[in-house]
Image (spheres, rainbow, N blue to C red):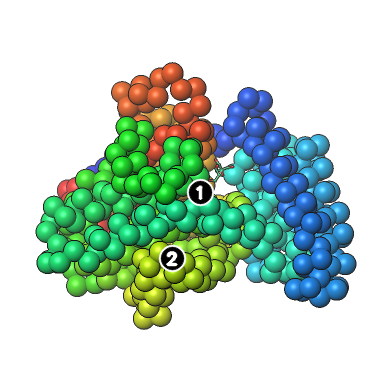
Amino acid sequence: MQFLCFTLLLEMGQASEALPDVLRGRYEGSFAYKTISERMPVILTKVIDLLHREKVTIGEQYGQAAREKVKWINGQLSELKSTMQRNKPLEPLSGAGSDVPLWNRLLEEQAASFDDKQVLWFDAPWLFVECFMYRKIREVLENSGELAHYDYFGQQKVATLEDSLGAISLLGEHLLEVVTEPGAPSQERKQRAVADFLGMSLWANKNDLSLSAGAHVSQEDSPLTQLVELNQYVLINDSARVFHQLELLRHREHVRIDIVMDNAGMELFSDLCLADMLTSLGIAQRMTFHIKTMPWFVSDTTHDDVRHFLQRLAAATDTPALPQLAARWQAYLDSGVWRLAADPFWTTPLPFSRMSAESPSLYQDLQAADLLVIKGDLNYRKLLGDRSWPHSTKFCRALEGFHPAPLVALRTLKADLVAGLPAEREAVTEGDPRWMVSGEWALIQLCECADSDRGKNEL
Ligand code: F6P
Ligand code: MG
């Protein structure tokens, strides 16, 4: 018989209380409003400009018919932008994608919550409409036929990777030093490595380009030195608790750690460094990387990004560490020690609390992990259901029952929501009115209580 962990029981007592509302763009001055009115139209415009600019190359690569479709695609995308800016209703999806029925059901669900049954861009939940825009762009391309698999964010991701090669080389060299150090790794060495590589994976989420605090990462900067400076901006740092969690698994024969990935480029590199350290120091025997099935939130990692990334590292022969790492990582993937998994759930607008009902197979897969590392701002929003929880709400409580395995969120704050932040920690952001959205502040936040562990530690 399984027992509910004590904290969960206490939290369930609160479950009947009304939940805080989800973030919406209807409040002028909110970050959601700014995103829908300014940031999202710019993202659409960039896709339109890119397709226009790349017409000739597209024709060469995908054929004349594809080139001729660009005008139609851009017409559709312009229309999408205009409906968004005029706060018109969201239209159902019409493509053949296997996720279309789900999307349209969720759209109907949203419509049912409004008196006039209209889902408007600024009135509907921000998370829903933002995800909808990315899915709609994909639909337009899918419906074009020839350009169904074209990655309209590909160029930006490639440029990001190229810009980050300096920092990538430094981090890669550091990783090789750590994992090739002679002798069996002591507990202290492991603990240090876990804290360092969690930190580097965290700060790579600040922006897609670098570990630095907004500034350009120069070749001379050591990523580790930056980490020491950046530590003061980590509002909650559960690294030591994460290490303790890993310690509990020490005598297990097969430990599996999953990373729910976020951005390509420097962040992908840092995440794979974290995975390499965990694998090489014998902390994990299996790693799964959950990536996206389609271009998503501009820089999120897809299969093609991983392929291109490993090829690029293999070709970086002026930094021997990089081809070496590319070969190591490819070997891990080929042998099944590492696995890439791309479930369509990650590109739905659903909060993670609905995963067990809407995507039971993914939930079960995550339950097989001993620890989940959940990366980035969008995943954090989905963990919290994009609700404006009182900031001091317990992190585990705000997950609303999403507990497939112990999980740690690594997130730089780029949206105005947070949980698990006591007032005395929030006080350190005083004087920075943009602390929730600037990406300058960060969290390493653990929730240990998992279905499989219920009763083990808490009772
Ligand atoms: O635009 C919404 C948003 O969640 C931002 O808050 C954030 O800048 C971006 O999308 C995605 O960030 P991340 O790559 O960390 O998920
Ligand atoms: Mg992202």
- Can the viewer see residue 426? yes
**Nearer to us: label 1 or label 2:** 2
Query: What amino acid type is highlighted by mark number 1?
Result: Leu
Residue 453 image offset from top left, x and y in percent: 25, 57
* Residue for point 41% across, 30% down: 391
Q: Nearer the viewer, residue 454 or 422?
A: 422
* Residue for point 51% across, 48% down: 209
Q: Upstream in the sequence, badge 1 or badge 2?
A: 1
Q: Nearer the viewer, residue 451 or 411?
A: 411
Side of 421 where 345 appears, left or right: right
Q: Is residue 55 above or below residue 420?
A: below
Q: How many marks?
A: 2
Q: Which of the labelled discs sits on residue 209, or is there none?
A: 1
* Residue for point 78% across, 38% down: 85
- Can the viewer see residue 380? no
Q: CA distance from mark 1 to mark 2?
A: 20 Å
Q: Badge 1: how crowded within 10 Å, few (<14), some, or many (20+)?
A: many
Side of 239 where 162 appears, left or right: right
Q: Nearer the viewer, residue 447 or 242?
A: 242
Q: What secondary structure is marked by label 2?
A: loop
* Residue for point 70% across, 66% down: 150
Query: What amino acid type is highlighted by mark number 2?
Result: Asp
Side of 274 where 281 appears, left or right: left
Q: Badge 2: how crowded within 10 Å, few (<14), some, or many (20+)?
A: few
Q: Nearer the viewer, residue 317 or 290?
A: 317
Residue 338 image offset from top left, x and y in percent: 37, 72
Query: Circle 2 is placed at which residue position?
Result: 318
